[in-house]
Image: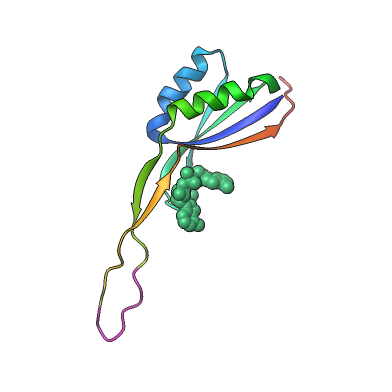
């Protein structure tokens, strides 16, 4: 058995959860936040048999798009009253960051 952790963008989470549940997978959806952009994202917990890992990853790939975000870096400390706002930094986010862990499951 494997536990798949998929960090996905908020905009992709709804259709991905729908697709996974339609295929019979059980999904837990957690609200999360990226440490770099400090934007909300979604972490899905999906526990599956080893043989189903590739099906889940294929579904994640089909529903998660890469997007561009612009981040404003912290302005440098101004010297002698001059101020140059730093140029926004472009970063690519997603489609998804996926971790596959060995897991055991006990229902209590
Ligand atoms: P964030 O940490 O907010 O990162 C958002 C995007 O910013 C990343 O997209 C990456 O393109 C960029 N980025 C992150 N750290 C950076 C750095 N130190 N320098 C320059 N650019 C940086 P993704 O790689 O697609 O990651 C999307 C989200 O997935 C992340 O949001 C984080 O919540 C999660 N994630 C990514 N890698 C992870 C990891 N190794 N462990 C845990 N969570 C991870």
Residue 60: x and y in percent read 50, 28
Residue 13: x and y in percent read 43, 29
Q: As rendered, which of 57 and 42 lies closer to the eye?
A: 57
Residue 83 is a magenta residue: no
Q: Quadrant of residue 1?
A: top right
- What span is colored magenta in the figure? 75-82
Residue at far bottom of view: 80
- What residue appears at the point 53 percent right and 13 percent down from the top-left corner? 23
- Count the marks: 0
Relative horizontal placement of residue 107, taking residue 74 as reference (left or right): right
Q: As rendered, which of 26 and 95 lies closer to the eye?
A: 95
Q: Is residue 89 visible?
A: yes
Q: Quadrant of residue 67?
A: top left
Q: Is residue 68 above or below residue 95?
A: below
Q: Is residue 34 visible?
A: no
Q: Is residue 39 above or below residue 81?
A: above
Relative horizontal placement of residue 46, taking residue 90 as reference (left or right): right
- What residue appears at the point 55 percent right and 23 percent down from the top-left corner? 27
Residue 98: x and y in percent read 57, 36
Chief secondary structure of the magenta portion: loop
Relative horizontal placement of residue 52, taking residue 63 as reference (left or right): right
Q: Quadrant of residue 100?
A: top right
Residue 51: x and y in percent read 68, 20
* Visual colour scheme: rainbow
Q: Quadrant of the C terminus?
A: top right
- What residue appears at the point 74 percent right and 27 percent down from the top-left corner? 104
């Amino acid at each position: 058995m494997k536990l798949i952790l998929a960090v996905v963008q908020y905009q992709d989470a709804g259709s991905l959860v729908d697709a996974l549940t339609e295929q019979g997978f059980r999904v837990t959806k957690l609200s999360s936040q990226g440490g770099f952009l400090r934007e909300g994202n979604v972490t899905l917990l999906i526990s599956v048999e080893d043989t189903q890992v590739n099906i889940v990853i294929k579904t994640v790939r089909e529903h998660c798009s890469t997007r561009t975000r612009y981040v404003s870096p912290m302005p440098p400390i101004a010297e002698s009253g001059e101020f140059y706002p730093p140029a926004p930094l472009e970063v690519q986010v997603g489609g998804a960051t996926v971790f596959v862990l060995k897991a055991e499951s006990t229902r209590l």
